[in-house]
Image (tube, helix red, strand yellow):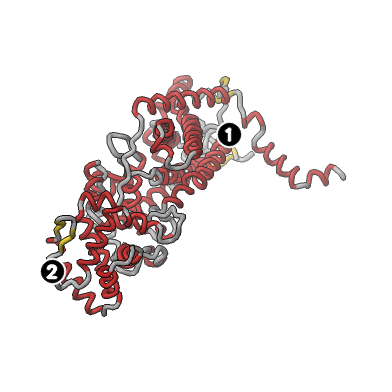
Amino acid sequence: MSNAQIDRQWTSRLRHSVVDKLPPDKLLPDTQPAYVASWIYVFGVTTMAALAVVIGTGCILALDGPQWWHSSSLGHFINSMHLWSVEIFFFAMVVHLWGKFSMAAWRGGRSLTWVTGGVTFLASILAGFTGYVSQTNFDSQWIATQAKDGINSTGGGAFFNVLNLGQMLMWHIVLLPIAAVVLTGLHVIMVRIKGVVPPFEDNAEVSA
Amino acid sequence: MTKKSFRPDVDAPEYKGAYVPYDIIKEGTIAVLVVVVLTVALAFVFSSPDEKAITIKTWSNADAVDFAQTAGDELSGTSGVAGYGAPYNNGGVAQHWGFLAPAKWVGVHININTATDFVLDPLEAQPAQPALTAAINQWKTASSANITAWTDAYTKVEANITFVNGQVKIPTTAAGPMPTLINYLTQMARTGALDQALVTQNGFYTTNYTKPLLFLSDGTYLASLADKQHLGGDQWGMMNETGQYPGQAWLWLYTFWYQIPPYNTSAAGDFLVWGTMMILTALMVLLPFIPGLRSIPRRIKIYRIIWREHYATQA
């Protein structure tokens, strides 16, 4: 088999494409532009760190089922960690979002990075919501019965029944975490490919 | 290489400045450790709320009259759920705004007949008792004119229902079998049997609590407990938690609309709130493509604070 034939293989093409767009020094950089020097940049990585803790504590809660935490002091503590990591996650994510808005971080071909970030935020809100209605306590009863009217008014309630614990729990522990992780991964890959958006400059020109 | 006009809100200048050392793995590791420590500390100090779920048994024992009135409404078809419309039934017109009626377009997908599902089927699952069996048969074989007459008579005295010596008293003789049915259902609810009957209608295994939750939401007991926990819709309820804990604070904008007209006065309030939020969400996600909006960061100049060191070195 000739080199040309090898290069035409799907596997070769995929590898070349990935390495061209995201070479190792971009994926795991050891330097960064000097303008990346503000506390605002901390909140992106904080969001991902909190997501890791949210998923970790969620996995522990999953070990003994959705009602374990009501009857176990250890389970209740893990649930508390789950709650507070979610609060940290959303706090960091919202600060990150406003920070990126203030920097107009979509400039320079980074529009999709912004869009994936926005969609990740929405998926996270849905993940948080399904968690709240899956608590199997008074709060989940009340939130579910209140939220049904909004979702029903859109027609979505016919398919996304917030009063169905089984459906909400599966979305919360399977579908939405997968969505959040995949979207976060895409978002981070885009950041690594394009780099951190440079500051606004007066009288700047762009090369085409 | 050609030059094209620079669009400051779309294009980014080419950075030709200095680079500094950056250890991305160390940064990520430290972030995880900090969040873990912070989470453990917050969990240890503040714990988390866990207000026990209420049951139809606790409701009917705590407020038998409210339960009996709600049961009467479910049987007569005058409850909130009975007249909800899609996706539960055709008992009413689902929320819509002008010609926009997505709930109606999608139609009924979660069939709920409140008289059958909440009252008659659970009662029929009870051990046979002559008076109860006769009342169920009388209701099921009655003409629609008879049922209308009974429900009209019931509605007139509904506010005067009492619960005395363990029995529901409905002060009318013109409501046909309704007093008997409501009284039996109340007794059933107070033992906890109705909770079981509502969730096991579809078989032994179940994870679907649609029916008991809809029944609970039709009464005033659930809402009264929620109000005490500052969870009411007019108390920014969706974003609150029981006790003094932070809830879904990120839903503040969604909850905000429910506090102001026309959202909190319109019969289509939920639809209007969701419509508004969908538009705002689309604007947020598609911001990079919207002229004017994407210029806001450049005009408000908060970036000057974020990149102050960079600009200081340029000065």
Q: Say what amino acid the circle numbered 2 marks.
A: Thr
Residue A182 in view: yes
| Host chain of mark 2 | B
Q: Which mark is residue A192?
A: 1
Q: How far apart are marks 1 and 2 (CA)?
A: 75 Å
Residue A9, given in percent of the width and then of the height, sits at: 77, 47
Is B175 situated above or below A13?
Answer: below
B125 sits left or right of B142 in the view? right
- Residue at position x 23%, y 79% from top? B145
Would you identify the image quadrant in which residue B16 lies? top right
| Host chain of mark 1 | A
Residue B192, given in percent of the width and then of the height, sits at: 31, 53
Q: Which residue occupies the foreground of this view, B64 or A69?
A: B64
Q: What residue occupies the far right of the structure in this picture?
A: A1
Residue named by callout 2:
B172
Instruction: Report the quarter where the C terminus of chain B lies.
Output: top left
Instruction: Report the quarter where the N terminus of chain B lies.
Output: top right
Is B225 situated above or below B213?
Answer: above
1 and 2 marks in contact (CB < 8 Å) = no
Residue A90, given in percent of the width and then of the height, sits at: 41, 36
Would you identify the image quadrant in which residue B183 lies? bottom left
